[in-house]
Image (spheres, helix red, strand yellow):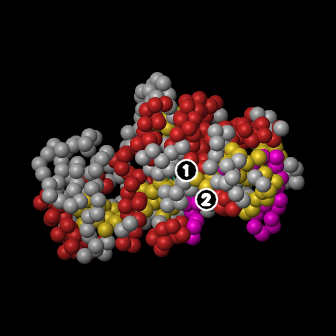
Amino acid sequence: MIDLSRRYDVLVIGGGNAALCAAISARREGASVLVLEAASEFWRGGNTRHTRNMRCAHDSATASLTGPYTEDEFFEDLLRVTGGVTDEELARFMIRESKDVLGWIEAQGVRWQPSLGGTLSLGRTNSFFLGGGRAMLNALYRTAERLGVEVRYLSEVVDLEIENGMFLSATVGREVPVRVTARALVAAAGGFESNIAWLRQYWGAAADNFLIRGTPNNRGTILKILLEHGAQKVGDPTQCHAVAIDARAPKYDGGIITRLDCVPFGIVVNRNAQRFYDEGEDIWPKRYAIWGRLVAAQPDQIAYVIFDASSLRLFMPSLFPPIEALTIPELATKLGLDAEALRRTVETFNAAVQPGTFNHKILDDCRTAELDPPKSHWARRIETAPFYAYPVRPGITFTYLGTRVNREARIIMSDGRPAKNMFAAGEIMAGNVLGRGYAAGIGMTIGSVFGRVAGREAARNARN
Ligand SMILES: Cc1cc2nc3c(=O)[nH]c(=O)nc-3n(C[C@H](O)[C@H](O)[C@H](O)COP(=O)(O)OP(=O)(O)OC[C@H]3O[C@@H](n4cnc5c(N)ncnc54)[C@H](O)[C@@H]3O)c2cc1C
């Protein structure tokens, strides 16, 4: 039985990677730790359940990584994807720590495996969890429980008592609220991606058509309370990781299997059967994360990837089968598009395709001429029946707005002073490192590095 009337050293809010890293780390520092997770035990672990890998710097190849990935290269990659919108000091700190975290995570029972096929060519840079994110989480929970961390499920925190940057207590549960006290707080309760009303403030009605790839529990309740109590805000609220996912995916928790990687192999049209962006601009790992925003900007936030039989086997299959037809007009009718408009778009595209040698593994020379927007690589005529389409919508992975932290993962208040006993890790502070853009696997790096630091510092704080 968990005794909620007891005053814990460290209270961790959340049940994903960041929370568990913090809980284990605090417990290993000798603190008594309570984890409050909104989800049930089966659904525990938020977005972390869906993950497959994490990006850590390393100086040489390992049993599961094909070569070195230096701190400098990691930082260069981060600069490129964020366009420089990152806190350089924190980013460099995170990257340096990530080297050690690779071994630390393993020491908590997590096992690695070589990169999976069809996973954005990450074999050198990213470590893959054996059994995926759920297995990774199970290992962390097992270790936490073995160490004596107490975990309470179905325990949504709905309010925090904070005075002058000092955490005093949390209120758990809506129907029968219970007050929980602790000497220090680690907020690891995710972003606000599942809160459609909050997203609507920035995206307008378009937000109603967004699909949320992960947990329905990351509604930003804790983030909002912290900001209302004077935590300094970091990041742009419209910035998030958003990819194109199958429009038939469920509203929440569709996970990785609803993502579509077929964009470079065909054309993408909107509801008016018009193309709107270069589908072959760059290799897919560098472009997959822009398509959520691109589709979000289209009428009704829907688009259709159109390709033919020659491309069907070139990408990872997803959960839903493509929609199939023997002619382009028939395909249009099945999609509810104007048949004549789609026929014209495909015909115009086909006429613009230049001769070249198709190679989907490199930036090949198959391109269009005098077409706006162009298709810069992998442009092949769409002419071999049957024809296929996937309807796509913006799939929001996680938001970047967060609380500012320092290198101790300590929350910085709006007057610039560090909070007395409040720390944050994971999505809730991702905006410190990710001002915009994304490099695959960095979400878990942010959670693991800052989770470990937050737990340690919260435990030390509680002792003093
Ligand atoms: C489909 C998908 C695939 C992904 N793949 C990868 C990948 O391979 N590599 C990678 O690096 N990143 C990936 N990500 C991103 C990654 O999931 C996140 O960056 C990471 O898991 C964030 O960890 P976290 O602990 O901050 O949040 P989460 O794991 O989402 O945990 C947040 C927790 O807080 C709990 N919570 C929320 N509000 C409350 C409250 N008020 N009270 C109590 N508990 C609360 C939630 O129930 C949840 O358990 C993926 C995301 C998705 C959706």
Q: Residue 206 or 21: which is nearer the viewer?
A: 206
- Identify the residue at horizontal 75%, vertical 52% (top origin): 165
Secondary structure of the residue carrying tag 2 is loop
Q: Is residue 231 left or right of residue 63?
A: right
* Structural distance between the alpha carbons of marks 1 and 2: 16 Å
Residue 180 lies in the magenta-colored region: yes
Dot 1 beta carbon under 8 Å from ligand 1: no
Task: Tell me residue 12's x, y (percent).
Answer: 72, 48
Q: Is residue 46 visible?
A: no
Q: Is residue 328 above or below residue 213?
A: below
- Identify the residue at horizontal 31%, vertical 55% (top origin): 263
Q: Which residue is mark 2?
A: 218
Q: Which residues, given as a range, are shown in magenta?
A: 169-198
Dot 2 beta carbon under 8 Å from ligand 1: yes
Task: Tell me residue 430's x, y (percent).
Answer: 56, 49
Task: Tell me residue 51's x, y (percent).
Answer: 52, 47
Task: Tell me residue 204's x, y (percent).
Answer: 48, 72
Q: Residue furthest top?
A: 60
Residue 217 lies in the magenta-colored region: no
Secondary structure of the residue carrying tag 1 is helix
Mark count: 2
Q: How many C-alpha atoms fall within 10 Å of the one at disc 1: few (<14), some, or many (≥20)? A: many
Q: Amino acid at mark 2?
A: Asn
Q: Which mark is residue 431?
A: 1
Please state which of the two labelled residues, at mark 1 or mark 2, is closer to the viewer: 1
Q: Amino acid at mark 1?
A: Gly
Q: Residue furthest right?
A: 5
Screen quadrant of the C terminus? top right
Which of marks 2 and 1 precedes in the sequence?
2
Q: Is residue 259 left or right of residue 447?
A: left
Q: Is residue 215 above or below residue 424?
A: below
